[in-house]
Amino acid sequence: MGRYARQFQDRRWFPASPRSLARAEGWYHRFGELSLLISWAPIIGDPLTVLAGVFRLPWWRALAWIVVAKGARYAVVLLLAQQWLVPLCQ
């Protein structure tokens, strides 16, 4: 989604102001693609993935970081569920 978003940045309905887009670009360039490791987080994760598209991170690298982050999240969820729920079911 983010890959083609910049072509609409001059439109009135575009959700980000030029100032906030420049601030996000500075933040993204400071932390780079490793920032996608927190894409598992509920509120900030989705905007990070959109920013990766806006700033033209190759899709295969973005996908790799997102899979690692979200895979780790669900591995922890499954581990916790196994620890806490399995004893309750026995």
Image: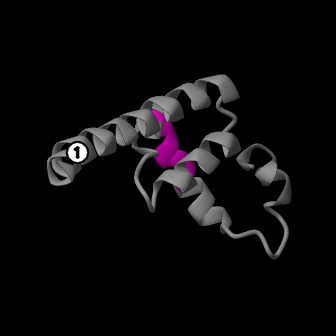
Question: Is 70 situated above or below 68?
Answer: below
Of residue 88 and residue 22, the one placed in the foreground of this image is 88
Q: Which secondary structure type mostly characterizes the magenta part of the structure?
A: helix
Percent across and percent down for residue 79 are 25, 38
Percent across and percent down for residue 18 are 67, 63
Q: In the image, what residue occupies the spot 61% across and 41% down?
A: 52
Of residue 74 and residue 50, the one placed in the foreground of this image is 74
Q: In the image, what residue occupies the spot 59% across and 31% down?
A: 62
The residue beneath circle 1 is: 80
Q: Type of residue at label 1?
A: Leu
Judged left or right of residue 35, residue 58 is: right
Of residue 13 and residue 10, the one placed in the foreground of this image is 13
What is the quadrant of residue 19 in the picture?
bottom right
Judged left or right of residue 6, residue 31 is: left
Question: Is 59 situated above or below 45?
Answer: above
Q: Per the image, is 26 magenta? A: yes
Of residue 16 and residue 34, the one placed in the foreground of this image is 34
Percent across and percent down for residue 75 are 34, 35
Report the magenta residues as a range.
24-32
Question: How does the figure colour the protein chain or chains?
Answer: one colour
Q: In the image, what residue occupies the spot 63% across and 49% down?
A: 50
What is the quadrant of residue 63 in the picture?
top right
Q: Per the image, is 30 magenta? A: yes
For the residue labelled by badge 1, is the local secondary structure a helix, a strand or a loop?
Answer: helix
Circle 1: is it few (<14), some (14-19), or many (20+) Cα within 10 Å? few
Q: In the image, what residue occupies the spot 45% across and 62% down?
A: 43
Judged left or right of residue 82, residue 33 is: right
Question: Is 13 situated above or below 30?
Answer: below
